[in-house]
Image (cartoon, grey):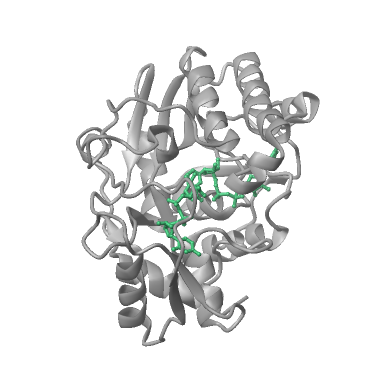
Amino acid sequence: MKVLVTGGAGYIGSHTCVSLSDSGYDVVIVDNLCNSSIGMVKGVEELIGRKLPFYQVDICNENELDAVFEKEQIDAVLHFAALKAVGESLEKPDLYHRNNVGGTEVLLKVMKKFAVDKLVFSSSCTVYGQPEIIPVNEDAPMLPAESPYGQTKQDCEKLISSSGLNSALLRYFNPIGAHPSGRIGELPIGVPNNLIPFLCQAVAGLKDELVVFGDDYPTDDGSCVRDYLHVCDLAEAHVAALEQLPHGIRAYNLGTGSGTSVLGVINAFEESTGESVPFRIGERREGDIVAIWADPSRAEKELGWCASRKVGEALADAWRWQQTL
Ligand code: NAD
Ligand code: UD1
C-alpha cells in the first residue's frame, strides 16, 4: 500500500513516516517546507535505511498535487500539512484559513479525481475547548474555536465529514518528545510557545528561565494540566488508524488518558534527565485551559492502540533531541 504523507517533513509527519515504513508501507512525502527542512526527510531516510519519494509541493497548488497523484499510485493519504502556531493565527487569520482549509479542499478534490478514498486527518483536542467532563471523550461538544487555528481544525473536520471519504479524524492531545535516536524531532522556529520546546531551551541555556503560567488554578498543585503524549506513540496511532480505517467518518482522541501538571512536567524532566530546570512562577496565560486529558478508550477498542511510553521517557527524548540542535 502506498501512502501519501502531506506535511511529512514536519514534526509528527516525519515520525509517522518512520512508523509507516517500519510497518511495511510505501511512503511518499509532500511538503512545501514552510515550517520544516529537508534535513528531516534525510533523517527519516537514515532511520529507515532507504530513500523516499519527496515532492516540495504546496498542497494548495492543485496542478502540482495532481502531478504527484499522476506519478505515484496513491492508495491512502495521511494529512498533516498545516500551519499550527496559535498566536500567529490570531495575527494572520486569512493565511491560516487559506493554507489549512483551502489546502484541505484542494487535497480532497484531487483525491476524488484519482479515486483515493482513504484519509487520516490531524485534528486537535483544541476542538473541545475547556470541556465540562474530564477525561474528554469524542462525544463531548465542540465549543466555539478559541483561535483562527482552532477554527481551521473544526472547518476541516466538517469538510472531511461531508466528503464521502473513509476517514479517521485524529484529535491529538499534547504531542511531545522525539525519536529516541535523536535523529528527528521538533524544529523550533522562532520563540517556541509550547511548554516542552521552551523548557528544553531554558535547560540548554538558550533562554534565561521557563515561566510557569500560573500556580493558582484549581488543580492539585495549582498549575495547568495536560495530556502529554510521546510523538512515537502518536505516530503508531496513525498506522493503527490506517489499518482499521472506518467506513465513513470517525473521530478518535489520541492521548495517554492521564494528565500531568506543568510543575509535574518539570519534576519528571529533572528525574529522567538529571538536569535542573530554571523556572519561576509567572502570571496566567490568557485563554489557557485549566485542565484537559483524553479518554482514549475508543482508540483502544476500535484501533487496538494505546500509548505505551511514559512522560519521563518523552522528556528524556526531547532533551536528547535538543542537544543535537
Ligand atoms: P509541523 O509544522 O512540524 O508540520 C507541518 C508540516 O506541514 C510542515 O513540514 C510544513 O512545512 C508543512 N506544510 C504546511 N503547510 C503546507 C502546505 N500548504 N503545503 C505543503 N506542506 C505544508 O507541525 P506538526 O506539529 O508536525 O503538526 C502536524 C499536524 O498536526 C498539523 O496539522 C497540526 O495542526 C496538527 N496538530 C499538531 C499538534 C502539535 O502539538 N504539534 C497538536 C494537534 C494537532
Ligand atoms: C497549545 C495551543 C493549542 C494546541 C496545543 C497543542 C495555545 C493557546 N493553545 O495548547 O491550540 O492544540 O498547544 O499543540 O497556544 N506553559 C507554561 N510556560 C510556557 C509554555 C507553556 O507554563 O512557557 C504551560 C501552559 O500554560 C499550559 C502547558 O504549559 O498549561 C502546555 O502549554 P502548551 O504547550 O502551549 O500547550 P496547550 O496549552 O495545551
Q: Position of residue 202 (x, y in %)?
A: 53, 78
Question: Looking at the image, is 165 positioned above or below residue 230?
Answer: above
Q: Where is residue 251 in the image (x, y as percent from the top left)?
A: 36, 28
Judged left or right of residue 28, residue 157 is: left
Q: Is residue 181 in view from this perspective? A: no
Question: Which residue shows up at 38% across the image and 33% down it?
Answer: 128
Tell which quarter ligand 1 is in. top right
Q: Which is nearer the eye, 26 or 118?
A: 118
Q: Where is residue 245 in the image (x, y as percent from the top left)?
A: 37, 28
Judged left or right of residue 93, residue 219 is: left
Question: Which residue shows up at 36% across the image and 73% down it?
Answer: 266
Question: Looking at the image, is 185 positioned above or below residue 302?
Answer: below
Judged left or right of residue 300, residue 78 is: right
Quadrant position of residue 295: top left
Quadrant position of residue 46: bottom right
Quarter of the figure that contains the C terminus: bottom right
The mark tally for this picture is 0
Question: Which residue shows up at 57% across the image and 80% down it?
Answer: 208
Question: Looking at the image, is 202 positioned above or below residue 50?
Answer: below
